[in-house]
Each structure stands twice: as structure tokens, then as C-alpha cells.
Image: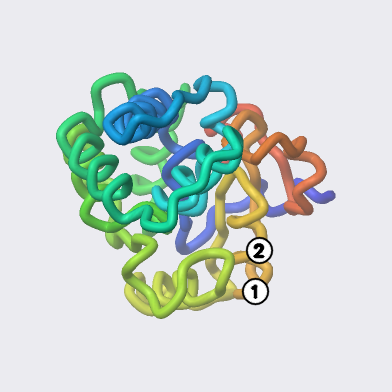
């Protein structure tokens, strides 16, 4: 594993959102348990829900139901309940990780272009960024429903490169999970993982990233 990718300033940075920029698990967990309770299903602990994040709301619901060995043929009602609740409570307990905002501000001040590349629906990604007053930091926001296919496909990264007008060789991906590493590898760009994200229980060092960081400030080159 080489840290050389964080020792230079890149033309563009693609950031995952949940578990990378922001700890959104408390609000996602609340929405999940609200949906489960509304449809007479048992709740899950937040520590477990954190392992379900990264592939969209429907996968969170499927994993929660599988965990309790429950079975539902039609998950759309649960999904609708989840999305309605989450949209109304998207930033109640969600908080940015330490040094994230300072790092975003610093990278922009040095001329880098920034994108969010998430599997969260774009509507919710935009709403969360607005609630945090972060929309000004990002030139592009790509959701799980924006590109032809979501991460771990290369499509969202390729689209980010196009919309940022930054060539692929000048792009760095920052994420927290195998999904992010897969997307970066598929797009053939380097990837950095944060240590304490939503990585489904896998140690960050075992995700296959080019570097692992403990603090966002490590992305700022000397």
C-alpha cells in the first residue's frame, strides 16, 4: 500500500458521502427501525445497521429482514415508509467527520474540483448537503440513480470526470468501503479509504485501497 497518492494535489477529488464525509448512520438507523416498526417487524441495533449501509435503502431493508429470518414478498411499502421518514429527518443526528470541512475548503482554495459520488439517491444527497450548508464545496453531485449503474461500477466515476472536466489521470477517489474501491478500480484511478467508515465489518487495510487515512486532513499535501 502506497501513500504517494495523498502526497500531491489532484485536479479532482471524488468523495463517497455516507461513512466518508458524514456519519449518517444514526439517521439511517432511525429511518430503518421506523420502517420496520410501521410494518410490524423487529428493530435492529445501530451497530448492525452500520454494516448494512452502502448499497442503498432497499438493501438495508433486505439485510434487516434477513437478519431476523423474516420474509416479505413485497418490500416496496417498507421502502416507501423508509424514504418518507428519512427525507423528513435526514440531518437530525448526522454529523461531519473531524477535519472534513476544513479539508474541503482547503482543497477548493488550491484549485481542486470536488465531487460527491454516492449510492444514496441524488435527491437525498442534495438535501443532506444543503442541510450541512456544504453545497458550495462541490462542483458535481452524483447519486446512485444518476449514472447508468451505481458503484461498484465505473459509471459514476467516469461521469464525474466528464462533468468536472477533469481527466481520469487527475482524479482521486476517497471512500470507506469495498464498493468505493471497486468503483475506483473499475475506473482505473487511485483510491484512499478512511479507517472508520461503513465497511461492512472489514478492516480498512483489507479493502485493497492505495492508502488508508485516519483524518481527512491527511489529504492536504504539504
Vertical position of residue 64 compared to residue 117: above or below: above
Residue drawn 66% across the image and 32% down it: 195
Residue closer to the observer: 13 or 193: 193
Q: As drawn, is 209 to the left or to the right of 65? A: right
Image location (x, y in percent) of residue 63: 55, 43
Q: Secondary structure at mark 2?
A: helix
Tell me if mark 2 has few (under 14), some (14-19) or many (20+) residues whose alpha carbon lies within 10 angstroms of its own.
some
Q: Are marks 2 and 1 in contact (CB under 8 Å)?
A: yes
The residue to which callout 2 is attached is: 182
Image location (x, y in percent) of residue 43: 45, 24
Image location (x, y in percent) of residue 37: 33, 27
Residue drawn 41% across the image and 28% down it: 29
Q: CA distance from mark 2 to mark 1?
A: 6 Å
Vertical position of residue 8 compared to residue 86: above or below: below
Tell me if mark 1 has few (under 14), some (14-19) or many (20+) residues whose alpha carbon lies within 10 angstroms of its own.
some
Residue 221 in view (yes/no): no
Residue 139 in view (yes/no): yes
Q: Secondary structure at mark 1?
A: helix
Image location (x, y in percent) of residue 110: 40, 49
Residue closer to the observer: 197 or 171: 197
Q: As drawn, is 153 to the left or to the right of 120? A: right
The residue to which callout 1 is attached is: 186
Residue closer to the observer: 150 or 181: 150
Q: Which mark is residue 170?
A: none
In the rendered image, which quarter contains the C terminus? top right
Vertical position of residue 138 compared to residue 187: above or below: above
Amino acid at each position: 500500500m502506497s501513500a504517494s497518492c495523498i502526497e500531491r494535489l489532484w485536479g479532482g477529488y471524488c468523495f463517497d458521502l455516507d461513512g466518508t464525509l458524514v456519519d449518517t448512520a444514526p439517521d439511517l438507523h432511525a429511518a430503518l427501525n421506523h420502517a420496520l416498526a410501521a410494518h410490524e417487524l423487529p428493530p435492529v441495533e445501530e451497530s448492525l445497521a452500520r454494516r448494512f449501509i452502502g448499497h442503498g435503502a432497499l438493501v438495508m431493508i433486505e439485510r434487516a429482514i434477513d437478519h431476523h429470518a423474516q420474509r416479505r414478498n413485497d418490500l416496496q411499502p417498507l421502502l416507501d415508509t423508509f424514504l418518507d421518514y428519512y427525507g423528513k429527518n435526514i440531518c437530525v443526528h448526522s454529523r461531519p467527520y473531524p477535519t472534513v470541512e476544513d479539508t474541503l475548503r482547503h482543497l477548493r482554495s488550491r484549485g481542486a474540483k470536488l465531487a460527491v459520488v454516492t449510492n444514496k439517491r441524488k435527491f437525498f444527497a442534495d438535501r443532506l448537503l444543503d442541510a450541512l450548508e456544504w453545497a458550495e464545496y462541490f462542483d458535481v453531485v452524483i447519486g446512485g440513480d444518476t449514472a447508468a449503474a451505481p458503484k461498484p461500477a465505473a459509471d459514476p466515476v467516469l461521469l464525474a470526470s466528464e462533468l468536472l472536466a477533469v481527466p481520469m489521470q487527475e482524479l482521486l477517489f476517497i471512500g470507506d468501503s469495498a464498493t468505493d474501491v471497486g468503483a475506483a478500480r473499475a475506473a482505473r484511478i487511485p483510491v484512499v479509504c478512511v479507517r472508520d467508515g461503513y465497511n461492512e465489518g472489514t478492516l480498512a487495510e483489507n479493502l485493497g485501497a492505495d492508502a488508508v487515512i485516519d483524518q481527512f486532513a491527511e489529504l492536504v499535501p504539504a
